[in-house]
């Protein structure tokens, strides 16, 4: 007697699909090509920027990162003030936009109002993402700057002696003004992604929480928000990345000062804004120094994304109950 026959592949299994396939998997090939192309473009950008920045790296070294003077006439280039300005404006923008964005996302994902009204509010909030950066900058010049000039001295006189970052004098074009506009620009990102994460929470979790006697807010704080935490973290990472790389609106409102920022109401500068303001008239070592600043911005953005990915994985494991 012959041995036992080999088991046939089950219907729907990968082996069965390969058995009936007569040609190459075009979709898989396209996905691989797209993935490799994306990675190749990122490497290409990094190599090109590094090549242009290499003369400044050779001549300035790490002193470019720790230096505080930017004087093209003397060929002195230090980017520490712009690094601090980039980080400070981005963090302040997130500090302002994160609670508001998550609150709007909760309002839109839960049944606080009828569906048509919630859809209208969602459309209006997400429409902010379609407004050009220069329009935000112009709106900031004509609306936000006068408000800061009017009410900023009151805040500085009241809290400036106790909180050094709130001391005067108060300038219209300042770190605080740029941070307000950045907060408005990243608000749609935080709101849209956080809302999608909250909507994706299984309905059974909500029903089970209510069945145990929890109120709506107890369910939101105790179950829904922790379950949607990975999506909210992802929204924060994307918003922080956009805030760090934003150029035009920040350049129009932050004051573009090469000095170290010492107050929220004083002028400051960012890496992106410095490149936008000086690149057209730059020559010689100045071009390489600006590309060095661009390289730093790329590295900072990649570092934020890597750190955010680590936090996202940790949050996902905690949400799933994995220690």
Image (cartoon, rainbow, N blue to C red):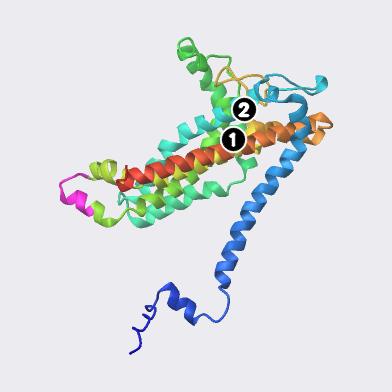
Magenta range: 207-215
Percent position of residue 24, x then y: 58, 75
Please say whether residue 209 is one of the residues in the magenta stretch: yes
User: Which of these two is toward me, 293 or 275?
Assistant: 293
Please say whether residue 144 is one of the residues in the magenta stretch: no
- The answer, for residue 246, to whether it is visible in the render is no
Q: Residues within 10 Å of mark 1 (few under 14, many from 20)?
A: some
| Residue 217: quadrant of the picture | top left
What residue is rendered at 48% in x and 34% in y? Answer: 94
User: Which of these two is toward me, 65 or 243?
Assistant: 65
Q: Which residue is mark 2?
A: 83
Quadrant including the N terminus? bottom left
What residue is rendered at 30% in x and 55% in y? Answer: 202
114 vs 153: above or below: below
Q: Residue 109, labelled with which disc?
A: none
Element marked by disc 1: helix
98 vs 108: above or below: above
27 vs 43: above or below: below
- Report whether 155 appears left or right of 211: right
Q: Residue 300, labelled with which disc?
A: 1
Q: Are marks 1 and 2 in contact (CB under 8 Å)?
A: yes
178 vs 167: above or below: below
Instruction: Please tell me how many numbered marks the rendered image carries.
Output: 2
Outermost residue on the bottom side: it is 1
- Report whether 30 appears left or right of 117: right
Outermost residue on the front side: it is 1
Percent position of residue 286, x then y: 79, 29
What residue is rendered at 37% in x and 46% in y? Answer: 316
Quadrant including the C terminus? top left
User: Which of these two is toward me, 128 or 54?
Assistant: 54
Percent position of residue 66, x then y: 65, 21
Element marked by disc 2: helix
């Amino acid at each position: 007697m012959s041995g036992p026959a080999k088991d046939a592949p089950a219907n729907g299994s990968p082996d069965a699909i390969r058995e009936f396939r007569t040609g190459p998997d075009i979709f898989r090939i396209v996905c691989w090509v797209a993935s490799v192309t994306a990675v190749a473009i990122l490497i290409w950008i990094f190599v090109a920027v590094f090549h242009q920045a290499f003369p400044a790296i050779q001549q300035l070294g790490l002193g470019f990162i720790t230096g505080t003077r930017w004087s093209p006439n003397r060929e002195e280039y230090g980017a520490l003030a712009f690094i601090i300005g980039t980080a400070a404006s981005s963090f302040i923008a997130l500090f302002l936009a994160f609670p508001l964005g998550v609150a709007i996302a909760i309002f839109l994902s839960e049944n606080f109002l009828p569906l048509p009204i919630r859809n209208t509010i969602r459309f209006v909030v997400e429409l902010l993402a379609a407004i050009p950066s220069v329009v935000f900058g112009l709106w900031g010049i004509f609306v936000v700057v006068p408000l800061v000039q009017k009410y900023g001295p009151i805040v500085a006189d009241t809290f400036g002696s106790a909180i050094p970052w709130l001391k005067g004098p108060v300038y219209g074009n300042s770190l605080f003004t740029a941070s307000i506009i950045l907060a408005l620009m990243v608000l749609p990102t935080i709101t849209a992604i956080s809302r999608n994460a909250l909507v994706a929470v299984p309905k059974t979790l909500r029903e089970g929480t209510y069945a145990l006697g929890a109120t709506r807010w107890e369910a939101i704080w105790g179950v829904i928000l922790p379950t949607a935490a990975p999506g909210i973290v992802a929204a924060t990472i994307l918003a922080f990345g956009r805030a760090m790389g934003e150029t035009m609106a920040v350049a129009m409102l932050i004051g573009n000062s090469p000095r170290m920022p010492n107050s929220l109401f004083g002028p400051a500068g960012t890496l992106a804004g410095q490149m936008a303001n000086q690149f057209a008239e730059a020559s010689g070592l100045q071009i390489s120094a600006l590309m060095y600043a661009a390289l730093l911005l790329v590295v900072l953005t990649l570092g934020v994304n890597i750190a955010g990915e680590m936090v996202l994985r940790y949050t996902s494991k905690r949400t799933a109950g994995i220690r």
